[in-house]
Amino acid sequence: MMLATQLKLLKEKRGLTNQQLADLSGVPVGTVNRILSGQTDNPSFQTICDLVLAMDGSLDELAGIEKDPEEPEAKAHASQDLIHLYEKMIEHKNRWIHRLFVLACLLGSIFIFLVIFDLMNPALGFVRS
């Protein structure tokens, strides 16, 4: 399909006039008219880019590059797998944090017990008077 035809279809799909397209893209209306009528055989890439982007189109579609229809599903599935992996890692780390907290509390309790025992029994403890 010719470039002018594809651009016309995209323009009609968006319901734009040549003037509106020129205003949105920053391309002079005369240039837009010449490109859409097919009078310009080889418009610059930047001009085509500006026109397509102004119409919220895709340069890939314009060039005939088809996207893989399963690509969004595959990305969504991969994202879900990644999220699941992160959740498992966080759960694993939280278990270790919990274990370390319990251990720290246990060691702190033992230390406090020893200090109190030492202060209560000066003859038996580490600090003797």
Image (cartoon, rainbow, N blue to C red):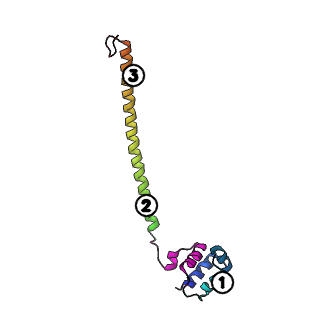
Horizontal side of residue 58 vs 29, given as left or right? left
In this rendering, the label closer to the viewer, 3 or 2: 3
Q: Residue at x 63, y 78 (%)?
A: 27
Mark 2 or 1 closer to N-term? 1
In this rendering, the label closer to the viewer, 2 or 1: 1
Q: Residue at x 61, y 73 (%)?
A: 54
Image quadrant assignment for residue 95? top left
List the residue tagged with mark 1: 30
Residue 50 belongs to magenta span? yes
Tally of numbered tags: 3
Q: Is 21 rendered above or below residue 90? A: below
Q: Is 103 rendered above or below residue 129? A: below
Label 1: which secondary element: helix
List x then y, in percent, for residue 87.
42, 49
Of the residues shown, which amino acid type is indicated by label 3?
Ile
Q: CA distance from mark 3 to mark 1?
A: 87 Å
Residue 73 belongs to magenta span? no
Q: Is 51 rendered above or below residue 99? A: below
Q: Residue at x 62, y 86 (%)?
A: 34
| Stretch of the chain drawn in magenta | 42-68
Residue 77: numbered disc: 2
In this rendering, the label closer to the viewer, 3 or 1: 1
Mark 3 or 2 closer to N-term? 2
Quarter in which the C terminus is drawn:
top left
Q: Residues within 10 Å of mark 1 (few under 14, many from 20)?
A: few
Mark 3 or 1 closer to N-term? 1
Label 3: which secondary element: helix
Residue 112: numbered disc: 3
Image quadrant assignment for residue 75? bottom left
List x then y, in percent, for residue 61.
51, 76
